[in-house]
Amino acid sequence: MSPTQVVVIVIVVLVLAALAAVAVVASRRRSLRQRFGPEYDRVVAERDSRSAAERELRDRERRHAELELTPLDPESRTRYAAAWEELQVRFIDSPAETVGDADELVSRLIAERGYPTGDFSDQIAHLSVEHARTLTHYRDAHEIRLRNERGEASTEELRQAVVHYRALFADLLGEDPVGHQPPAQRHPDHPHDATSR
């Protein structure tokens, strides 16, 4: 084999190795995008580089794998669903208090499922692995709850907070986050009906 042929073979092998590496990176990126959905874009926007964001998301997957998550038994699921219905009824008479109650109920459900409930950002990171599509709702609800504690939230914002909490709550229960009612039965102008979405 001539030296020229050896050089050509080495170049071809290097090009194939580079293409394989690019394909692996693209496959990992696609997998992270599918798993984390909108959370992927959020983390990419917050980090210095896409690779740093992807390291963060892979770290979240690793930490999530260390959790001992437990599915809810039917009795617990029924108990939580009943508690949510009671909460929605109370909203009409005391919206500000109900937002705090919604946060507590969601936190109890998160804990019972096996997720940590301490620091909010850690909680979000752990939830993002399996519940990324409802995290925007949870973040929005959390922000409104904090404004409510400062006396700065309107009744409409409080209603929205309960709707946002409901999205994560339903996701954690394993329900459709937008509810099971057919669209024709929903009445978004009424706070009780709107919170069931």
Image (cartoon, helix red, strand yellow):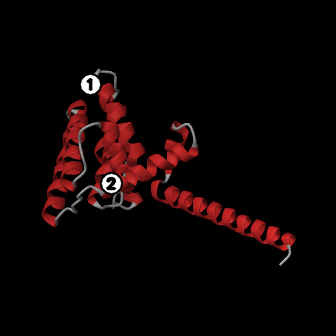
Which is more toward the observer, 153 or 143? 143
Query: Is residue 32 toward the left or the right of residue 98 in the image?
Result: right
Callout 2: SS: helix
Residue at the front extreme of this rendering? 2
Query: Is residue 77 toward the left or the right of residue 177 in the image?
Result: left
Which is more toward the observer, 182 or 58? 58
Please provide percent x and percent y for residue 180. 33, 61
Q: Which residue has dot 1 on it?
A: 149
Q: Please say whether residue 152 is visible from this viewpoint.
A: yes
Residue at 31% across / 48% down in the picture? 166
Residue 64: numbered disc: 2
Q: Quadrant of residue 24?
A: bottom right
On screen, 179 above or below 137? below
Query: Is residue 146 toward the left or the right of residue 71 in the image?
Result: right
Sequence-earlier tag: 2 or 1: 2
Residue at the bottom extreme of this rendering? 1
Q: Nearer the viewer, mark 2 or mark 1?
A: 2
**Three-letter amino acid code of the residue under disc 2:** His
Residue at 37% across / 57% down in the picture? 130
Residue at 16% across / 50% down in the picture? 83
Please provide percent x and percent y for residue 10. 75, 68
**CA–CA distance in space, label 2 to label 1:** 31 Å
**Mark 1: few/some/many CA within 10 Å (<14, 14-19, 20+):** some
Callout 1: SS: helix
Q: Please say whether residue 178 is visible from this viewpoint.
A: no
Quadrant location of the N terminus in the rendered image: bottom right
Please provide percent x and percent y for residue 163. 34, 44
Tag 2–tag 1 contact (CB < 8 Å): no
Q: Quadrant of residue 93?
A: top left
On screen, 124 above or below 66? above
Residue at 24% across / 49% down in the picture? 110
